[in-house]
Amino acid sequence: MQKFSDKLNVIAGDTNACLKKFLFKKNKYSYLIKPMKYGVFSGGKRFRSAIIVNVGKIFNIDYKKLIIVGAAIECVHSYSLIHDDLPAMDNDDLRRGRLATHKKFNEFTAILAANSLLTLAFEILSSKNLKLSSKVKNELITSLAIYSGFSGLAGGQYFDLTFENKKISKKKIINIQNNKTGKLFAFCCECAGIIKEQNFKKRKILKKIGLDIGLLFQITDDLIDFKGNSKIVGKPTKMDKNKGKPTLVNLLGYKKTLNFANNLKNKINKKIQNYGIKSQDLLQSVEFILDRKS
């Protein structure tokens, strides 16, 4: 039986191959292509793409279609990381053990490269390579736009920065993290329902599973920041505490947050198990989140 880590590597490799096809078609003389490649090929696990593939398996969706959608979501994720590292935001010099994009190039180049990755995501979803109806493509584009914008990722990042060094409730922290991280994972799960043209009720269930997976992912990031090894993580740790970030770890402490995360994981797994035997890879994905070291 293939190990889960090997399955992740296969999906990551296929996602990267898809991204290269879209990026290498671009004008090689554009000065933004190099920083775009630097930002998007930064050694990430392509975990969001893996979630898309593993949810898609449950509904027998063509693998190639899932990989193309995965490439789009990884562009959005990479755009968010480049912005996240900027001096105006989290002011991090390192990302995954190497210089952040704005340190490798400069700030304005990093901003423009990140913005170009965001727009590339929508170009990928609208491309002829993605063999879906115009109606389904439009729904995918609309959904990703909403989850990436002011009521999703961008809005969550705004409040994450706004509430630094301010004491806020557990409920507000969860809301921030649902937007900052959870909404992209919501898309990763809901997109299968969009592709299969499911009704609102069925898509809402997938969206909620994705939100919870995203929250678990963010909480694990915060736990790693608190106790992780900076050499393994690829950047300095304990930064959330130093910056007064609105995290559950800073509010509740490590042990209570870890208990919360384990309870959340069990809750997610119960929902996923309703999809039967084809949900095994998705269940493994959830287990992987809390076990990871970086």
Image (cartoon, grey):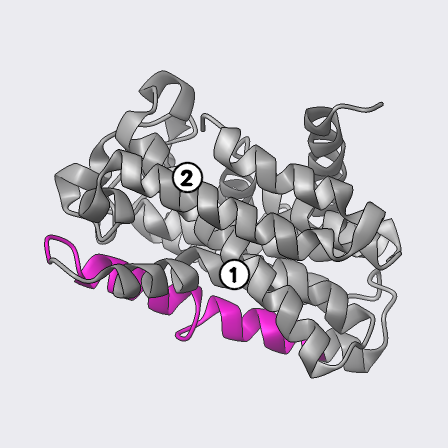
Q: Quadrant of residue 172?
A: bottom left
* Residue 113, magenta (yes or no): no
**Quadrant of the drawing holding the C terminus:** top left
Q: Is residue 45 visible?
A: no
For label 1, the crowd category at 10 Å Cα-Cα, with few meaning under 14, some 14 to 19 and many 20 or more, is: many
Q: Is residue 292 visible?
A: yes
Q: Quadrant of residue 240?
A: top left
Q: Which mark is residue 48?
A: none
Q: Amino acid at mark 2?
A: Thr
Q: Quadrant of residue 45?
A: top right
The local secondary structure at tag 1 comes to helix
Q: Amino acid at mark 1?
A: Leu
* Image coords of residue 12 (percent x, y): 69, 36
- Residue tagged by mark 1? 211
Residue at 60% across, 74% down:
143
Q: Which residues are magenta?
A: 139-166
The local secondary structure at tag 2 comes to helix
Residue at 14% across, 38% down:
242
Position of residue 49 relative to residue 229, above or below, is below
Magenta region, main secondary structure: helix
Viewer-nearest residue: 107 or 133: 133
180 sits left or right of 127 in the view: left
* Residue 163, magenta (yes or no): yes
Give whichever of discs 2 and 1 has the lower sequence position.
Answer: 1
- Residue tagged by mark 2? 220
